[in-house]
Amino acid sequence: MKTHYDPDADALYLRFSDHTVEGSEEVAPGIILDFDDQHRIVALEVLNAREKMASGALPIAAE
C-alpha cells in the first residue's frame, strides 16, 4: 500500500494496488473510491482529510 498526503489540498490518497484506475465513485461526501476494470477497489481518496481523520493520523506540515 502506498500513501500520499497533500497538505495544500488537504487530501489523503491511499493506493492499494498498481492496477489501472478505470473509474471513480464518491461514496460519501469527500470520500472517493477508485476502481479497476474488474470493479475492485484500487485506491481511496479522502478530501478535507484534517476534519475526517483522527488527530495525529496525518503528517504535520513543515512550518
Image (cartoon, rainbow, N blue to C red):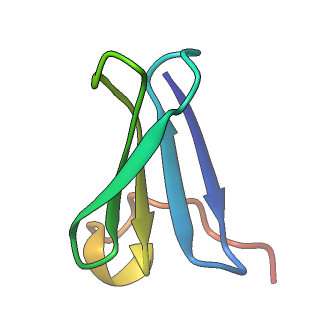
Q: Position of residue 4 (x, y in %)?
A: 62, 47
Q: Position of residue 51 (x, y in %)?
A: 32, 84
Q: Foreground residue, 23 or 59? A: 23
Q: Residue at x 41, y 20 (%)?
A: 37
Q: Is residue 46 left or right of residue 19?
A: left
Q: Please, is residue 54 above or below residue 4 in the view?
A: below
Q: Residue at x 58, y 23 (%)?
A: 20
Task: Count the numbered circles shown.
Answer: 0
Q: Residue furthest left?
A: 28
Q: Residue at x 53, y 32 (%)?
A: 21
Q: Is residue 20 left or right of residue 16?
A: right
Q: Quadrant of the C terminus?
A: bottom right
Q: Residue furthest right?
A: 63
Q: Please, is residue 51 above or below residue 24 in the view?
A: below
Q: Residue at x 35, y 58 (%)?
A: 32
Q: Position of residue 34 (x, y in %)?
A: 41, 42
Image-quadrant location for residue 27:
bottom left
